Amino acid sequence: QVQLVESGGGLVQPGGSLRLSCAASLTLFSIYTMGWYRQAPGKQRELVAAITSERKTNYVDSVKGRFTISRDNTKKTVCLQMNSLKPEDTAVYYCNAVAPGTMRGQFSSWGQGTQVTVSS
C-alpha cells in the first residue's frame, strides 16, 4: 500500500515562507509525475504544482512565481518551497502522484496532509 507522509506546515505571517516535504513509499518513484495539492475549507482539493519524471514543472496561476516544486528520486521525496505566502494559501496540503492525463491524484490512499495557515 502506498504511503504518503507530508510535513513542514505551520502558521506563518503574510509574506513569509514555508517548505513542505513529502516522503513517498512508491516503488519506481522516479517514473511518476508528483504533485502537491491543497484543500481549503469549503473548497475542492486542487492541484497547485507538479513535477514530471523529467523534472518539468507546472503551477496553477495563483502560485506561479511564489512556489517551487522539487524532487529527490534517491530519497523518494518531493518538496514545495512556498514564498510570499498569502492568506488565500491557507489550506491543508497533500502530495500524491498525478494520474496521467488528469489533475487527479493517482492513489486513493492520501496522507494526512499538513496544515498551512497564513495569518497575521
Image (cartoon, rainbow, N blue to C red):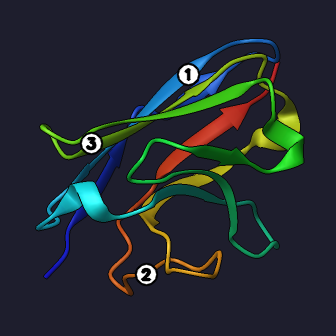
* Residue corresponding to mark 2: 106
- Give the number of the disc on residue 77: 3
Amino acid type of the residue that numbered disc 1 sits on in the rendered structure:
Leu
Residue at image position (50%, 71%) is: 98
Q: Choose between 48 and 50: the one closer to the eye.
A: 50
Q: Nearer the viewer, mark 3 or mark 1?
A: 3
Q: Does residue 80 appear left or right of residue 43 in this picture?
A: left
**Element type where label 3 sits in the image:** strand
Q: Nearer the viewer, mark 1 or mark 2?
A: 2
Q: Earlier in the sequence, mark 1 or mark 2?
A: 1
* Residue 44 drawn at (x, y percent): 76, 76
Q: Does residue 16 appear left or right of residue 53 in this picture?
A: right
Furthest toward the front, the residue is: 54
Q: Does residue 4 appear left or right of residue 35 in this picture?
A: left
Amino acid type of the residue that numbered disc 3 sits on in the rendered structure:
Thr
Q: Earlier in the sequence, mark 3 or mark 1?
A: 1
Residue at image position (84%, 28%) is: 86
